[in-house]
Amino acid sequence: MFFEFGQYTLHYRRWGHGPRVLLAFHGFGQDAGIWEQLEPSLLPHFTVYAFDHFHHGQSKYPAGSKKDTPLQPEFYTALFNAFLQNNHIDHYWLAGYSLGGKTALFLLRTLSLKPEGILLFAPDGIIESGWYRFVSRTKTGEWLYRHTMKHSGLFFPALKSMQKAGLLAPALYKFVSGNLSTVKKRQLVLDTWRSYALLRGATPETYRIIREGHIQAHIFTGIHDRVLHKNIGPRFAQQSGGTHHSLKAGHDLIRHKTNAALKTVLDKLFPTEA
């Protein structure tokens, strides 16, 4: 399904007939279909609207525009305000994995209609890395990234040496090398980072809105995650008053084995639907 806003095309998938709406945002390099893996836990409770991020799936920038043009916060907020209004949605939850976690946190803070709850899975946007800020928001960082990725003959052997020397965790080495293994993938990283650079994740205002609005907030993290900072779960729970769920997993949390933990949480929240 498609939602046209201005010259932008937002692609989304809808499935389920649960009594409440869930707006779901996937991680880098994925598309909306990834959420099908959590159907057993989600569908008794939600009708899911899962979106393709721009540069992923079938969501598209205007023809002729630069792919790394930053999305303006006011525009992105207006896009989803219009989506809610157009689909007559007046109650909803948010969900986000990795990159989608940052998107969900941004929308929680900026949308006119606030969500009833939010489900975060290994989300970006809680503790932001200096490298990400440098590459995505400075011309020098962009130039350095482009230069390094064009001359990758030294970059990947250096990564491998760091991994062998114990300076880079094997899981993080696998994640980085996998996402940068081709020219197309490296370009996608840059386009995505710069496109979403101005959409900030969790801020003090985000936490205030969750607390004062009594928004149900749950964050799931993997104890073996070497991609994100290990303190994102405790920090989010402490600042928001939400609940942290620590799973025996790595960064990849949108997978079938997450269903058991998520089902326990949702069945407790909505016992009459369990």
Image: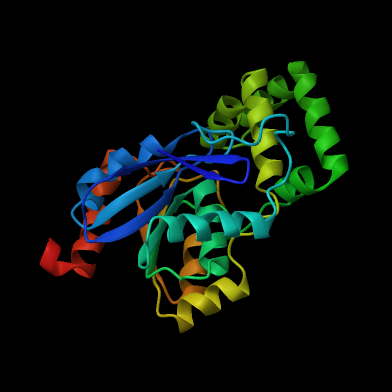
Q: Quadrant of residue 120?
A: bottom left
- Which residue of the protein is positioned furthest toward the top in this rendering? 153
- Left or right, 176 with respect to 25, comes to right
Relative to 114, is 4 above or below?
above
Instruction: Give the image location of residue 156, x and y in percent.
Output: 69, 22
Q: Is residue 101 visible?
A: yes
Instruction: Give the image location of residue 242, x and y in percent.
Output: 41, 72
Count of labels in the image: 0
Q: Quadrant of residue 144?
A: top right
Quarter of the N terminus within the rendering: top left
Q: Is residue 230 visible?
A: no
Quarter of the C terminus within the rendering: bottom left
Front residue of 148 and 212: 212
Relative to 37, is 83 above or below?
below
- Left or right, 270 with respect to 172, comes to left
Relative to 25, is 61 above or below?
above
Front residue of 47 and 209: 47
Instruction: Give the image location of residue 63, x and y in percent.
Output: 67, 30
Front residue of 86 and 240: 86
- Left or right, 204 with respect to 213, comes to right
- Which residue of the protein is positioned furthest toward the bottom in this rendering? 212
Front residue of 164 and 216: 216
Q: Quadrant of residue 263?
A: bottom left
Q: How is the image coloured?
A: rainbow
For the point 60% across and 32% down, the residue is: 176
For the point 63% across and 36% down, the residue is: 61
For the point 61% across and 21% down, the residue is: 181
For the point 25% across and 48% down, the residue is: 259
